[in-house]
Image (cartoon, rainbow, N blue to C red):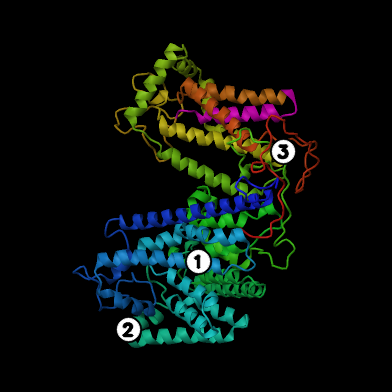
């Protein structure tokens, strides 16, 4: 009676209410992910259909006749633009009756449906048992990743057929009933992309010998049918071009992510290159198949299929960007014994398949061979080297857990702590940190470069800043600039300080914190990230011309030299940086962040004082060189203060340990308990708790 509601119905137990709330949140997240997948699909289709004719679906132009209707007759390889097999051409022949525009719409939406089907089949192929969260969220996540991937975007834009072979292989391995049907689907896929014949030995060595025989038979029958229908084209493809070698673009083009293309880019050619390619290709195929067979016997058949596909990419004479989806499928493999290492491989694969290589690796000459062959190296690693965990490993379902500081209450009731900013006590994965820092900075640079508001608007804002400084008696830029210019050694000192210490000191501080104080590293990194994000908003909302770009002000640009103000577009945008991203000054903001972090963490007084000198020298340098107004430094200080405030609000106070954790140790030493005050009780939904080993893979 005491637990009954007013209407006479029994009240739900607290545990049931909690479970219902978690289930509701899970379904809400699932709905949001499906909406995201739909938005991405619409965005990709709109991007293709909005592109002018002649620039989209260019691979379909192989079939265009002089009257705008696709042609039926004529050799396929007359212009070498068509790179598919003769069987692929035979399949496409019936489409040659359609008009160009109707085919464009139909082809684009048809490809979109194939991508959705591919994502659903891949999710169905996940090894069981699959947790409830994975079962609900995997499909929209997979489809969203496919929509974002460079191979799918390239396929939609070019009008290619590369989704079909991948889908046929997955259907043959995971959906088809009966070995012969599955093998036939894989054989048809190999008829469209010959290196997929590698799946025949995979089927054979995993005990599906009828499927292997059916795949070989289907490949031979499809190829023979194409020979009978188009003997000239078949001879051109299989004999003259040696299974398509030489068709399409140049084999040494960066878009060809195969061993053959990489060897050509390295300067090898002739018999030496061919022999080395055949030797390396045989080694990769052998190692890849051995690993694939092992993981197939282990119950990870989707991973085995992905490994075989990655090997097919490497050994193919030409593996164009739209044919590289196998690398994305390889992220289903689990790597790492520690929970903190689990994200490295999937994050690296997702970034590799969704972002240009120049955003992942710096533009350094020594890294060009790696950057030019990034996808190939990922495929080779997946096929031959990445130590994917076996399902029999004790770490497969239960990795070494990450240790966290004691939970703290939320600052305000309606502003929860962010789960991904929980106060971890262990050192993060170094490779993952470097990768994320590089990608984040590349994205920051792109946004900063695009945040231009035009010269007139930037100069108007500069006049507003100058008027405000005159009211506040802070307009010292001209006097300081000319005083420094008159002293040669001082001018060179500030020029060097401005151009060199902006990146050097923050990176040094982050590196030392990572190595010596991993707990403080995460806190400092979060505050720096929030400050930089707020600065980007400032660049967008208030483009500002620095003093050196103001005509008739008389400021001397000591770093860049004499400027030509007669150019109408001067200062709006350069190839390197947005010159109107002056408010707030991140030169001063980042230096102030360094000073505050050093002052808080440094153990000795002289270290704290030395750290605080850095923002003082930076403030003098940005004014003396004519690159910032005094109020720009005030704006930089404001975003840094807000960054520390947001980190405290969303992450909690800086975690403190009684003794520094030993190098490489996953667990923390003893941590003093931080009791929640009675006035701010901790919500069960907002509280942090130590990570528990999860029994499912999200």
For the residues bearing labels 3 and 1, Cβ distance under 8 angstroms: no
Indicate the quadrant containing the C terminus: top left, top right, bottom left or bottom right.
Answer: bottom right
Of pointers 3 and 2, the one earlier in the residue sequence: 2
Counting from the top left corner in percent of width and height, residue 363 is at 50, 47
Residue 213 seen by the camera: yes
What is the count of numbered marks? Answer: 3
Q: Which residue is mark 3?
A: 517
Segment colored magenta: 582-605
**Other residues around mark 2 within 10 Å, as few (<14) / some (14–19) / many (≥20):** some
Q: Is residue 593 magenta?
A: yes
Q: Is residue 434 left or right of residue 118?
A: right
Please name which of the two marks, 3 or 1, marks the residue nearer to the observer. 1
Counting from the top left corner in percent of width and height, residue 632 is at 48, 24
Of pointers 3 and 1, the one earlier in the residue sequence: 1
Gap in angstroms between the C-alphas marked 3 and 1: 44 Å
Q: Which residue is mark 1?
A: 120
Residue 579 seen by the camera: no
């Amino acid at each position: 009676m005491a637990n009954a509601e007013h209407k006479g119905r029994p009240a739900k137990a607290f545990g049931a209410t909690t479970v219902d709330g978690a289930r509701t949140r899970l379904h809400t997240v699932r709905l949001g992910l499906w909406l995201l997948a739909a938005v991405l699909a619409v965005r990709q289709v709109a991007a293709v259909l909005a592109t002018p004719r002649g620039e989209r679906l260019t691979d379909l132009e192989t079939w265009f006749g002089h009257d705008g209707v696709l042609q039926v007759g004529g050799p396929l390889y007359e212009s070498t633009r068509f790179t598919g097999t003769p069987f692929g051409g035979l399949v496409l022949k019936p489409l040659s009756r359609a008009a160009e525009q109707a085919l464009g719409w139909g082809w684009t939406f048809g490809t979109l449906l194939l991508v959705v089907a591919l994502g659903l089949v891949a999710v169905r192929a996940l090894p069981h048992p699959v947790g409830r969260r994975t079962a609900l969220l995997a499909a929209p996540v997979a489809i969203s990743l496919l929509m974002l991937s460079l191979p799918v975007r390239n396929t939609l834009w070019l009008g290619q057929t590369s989704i079909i072979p991948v889908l046929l292989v997955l259907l043959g391995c995971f959906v088809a009933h009966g070995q012969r049907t599955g093998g036939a689907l894989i054989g048809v896929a190999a008829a469209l992309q010959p290196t997929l014949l590698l799946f025949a030995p995979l089927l054979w060595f995993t005990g599906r010998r009828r499927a292997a025989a059916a795949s070989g038979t289907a490949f031979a029958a499809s190829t023979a049918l194409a020979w009978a229908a188009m003997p000239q084209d078949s001879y051109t493809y299989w004999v003259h071009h040696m299974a398509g070698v030489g068709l399409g673009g140049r084999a040494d083009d960066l878009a060809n992510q195969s061993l053959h293309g990489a060897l050509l880019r390295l300067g090898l050619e002739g018999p030496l290159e061919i022999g080395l390619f055949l030797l390396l290709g045989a080694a990769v195929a052998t190692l890849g198949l051995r690993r694939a067979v092992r993981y197939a016997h282990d119950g990870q058949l989707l991973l085995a299929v992905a490994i075989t596909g990655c090997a097919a990419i490497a050994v193919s004479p030409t593996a164009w960007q739209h044919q590289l989806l196998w690398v994305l499928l390889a992220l289903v493999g689990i790597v790492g014994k520690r929970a903190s290492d689990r994200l490295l491989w999937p994050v690296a694969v997702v970034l590799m398949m969704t972002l240009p290589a120049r955003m992942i690796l710096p533009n350094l000459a020594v890294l060009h061979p790696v950057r030019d062959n990034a996808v190939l190296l990922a495929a080779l690693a997946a096929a031959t080297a990445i130590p994917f965990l076996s399902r029999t490993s004790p770490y497969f379902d239960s990795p070494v857990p990450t240790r966290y500081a004691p939970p703290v209450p939320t600052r305000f009731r309606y502003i929860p702590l962010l789960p991904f900013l929980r106060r971890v006590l262990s050192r993060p994965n170094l490779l993952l940190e470097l990768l994320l820092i590089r990608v984040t900075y590349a994205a920051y640079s792109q946004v900063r470069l695009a945040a231009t508001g035009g010269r007139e608007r930037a100069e108007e804002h500069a006049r507003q800043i100058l008027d405000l400084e005159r009211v506040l008696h802070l307009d010292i830029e001209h006097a300081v600039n000319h005083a420094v210019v008159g002293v040669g050694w001082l001018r060179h000192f500030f020029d060097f300080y401005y151009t060199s210490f902006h990146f050097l000191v923050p990176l040094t501080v982050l590196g030392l914190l990572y190595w010596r104080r991993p707990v403080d590293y995460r806190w400092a990194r979060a505050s720096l990230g929030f400050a930089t994000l707020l600065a980007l908003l400032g660049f967008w909302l208030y483009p500002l011309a620095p003093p050196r770009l103001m005509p008739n002000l008389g400021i001397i640009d000591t770093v860049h030299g004499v400027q030509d103000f007669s150019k109408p577009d001067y200062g709006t945008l350069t190839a390197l940086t947005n010159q109107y991203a002056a408010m707030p000054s991140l030169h001063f903001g980042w230096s102030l962040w360094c000073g505050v972090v050093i002052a808080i963490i440094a153990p000795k007084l002289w270290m704290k004082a030395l750290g605080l000198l850095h923002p003082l020298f930076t403030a003098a340098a940005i004014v003396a060189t004519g690159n910032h107004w005094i109020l720009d430094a005030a704006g930089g200080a404001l975003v840094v203060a807000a960054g520390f405030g947001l980190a405290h609000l969303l992450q909690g106070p800086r975690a403190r340990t009684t003794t520094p954790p030993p190098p490489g140790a996953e667990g923390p030493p003893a941590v003093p308990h931080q009791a929640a005050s009675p006035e701010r009780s901790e919500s069960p939904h907002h509280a942090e708790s130590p990570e528990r080993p999860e029994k499912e893979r999200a």
